[in-house]
């Protein structure tokens, strides 16, 4: 979605229609994030708690940052980069 100034009034702008990605790409994007979250909560965190003895709540921050949020952030940046639109 972008705000572009209209030709008439200086202060007004119009909102263009957002770009849709379709069902397949939506399932890939959010399904991938869901699988990463499942992997983090059912395998990575329990394994790290067992092997290190660190509190699970502390491991949540590290594991969620590395396995869930970082890939989503990188995917967002790549999608914006390859869309060809201005930052």
Image: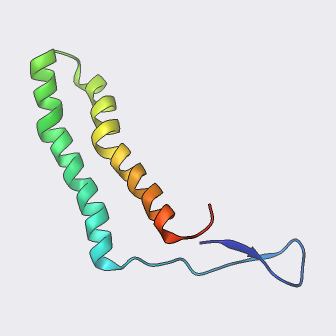
In the rendered image, the quadrant that contains the C terminus is: bottom right
In the rendered image, the quadrant that contains the N terminus is: bottom right
In screen coordinates, is 9 left or right of 38? Answer: right
Q: Is residue 26 above or below residue 55?
A: below
Taking the view exactly as shown, the residue that stands out farthest to the top is 53
Which residue is drawn at the image coordinates 23% and 47% (left, top)?
37
Q: Position of residue 46 (x, y in %)?
A: 12, 30
Q: Residue 34 appears in which quarter of the rendering?
A: bottom left
Number of callouts in the render? 0
Q: Position of residue 38 (x, y in %)?
A: 18, 47
Q: Which one is in front, 77 or 48?
A: 77
In screen coordinates, is 32 left or right of 52? Answer: right
Q: Position of residue 55 (x, y in %)?
A: 23, 19
Which residue is drawn at the image coordinates 20% and 40% (left, top)?
40
Q: Is residue 53 above or below residue 10?
A: above
Q: Residue 59 appears in which quarter of the rendering?
A: top left
Q: Is residue 46 above or below residue 82?
A: above
Which residue is drawn at the image coordinates 44% and 78% (left, top)?
20
Instruction: Describe the colour scheme in one phrase.
Output: rainbow
Taking the view exactly as shown, the residue that stands out farthest to the bottom is 8
Q: Which one is in front, 2 or 85?
A: 85
In screen coordinates, is 42 left or right of 71? Answer: left
Which residue is drawn at the image coordinates 37% and 44% (left, top)?
70
């Amino acid at each position: 979605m972008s705000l572009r100034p209209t030709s008439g009034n200086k202060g007004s702008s119009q909102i263009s229609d957002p770009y849709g990605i379709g069902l397949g790409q939506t399932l890939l994007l959010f399904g991938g994030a869901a699988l990463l979250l499942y992997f983090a909560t059912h395998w990575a965190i329990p394994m790290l708690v067992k092997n290190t003895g660190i509190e699970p709540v502390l491991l949540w921050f590290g594991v969620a940052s590395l396995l869930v949020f970082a890939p989503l952030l990188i995917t967002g940046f790549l999608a914006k980069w390859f869309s060809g639109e201005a930052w």
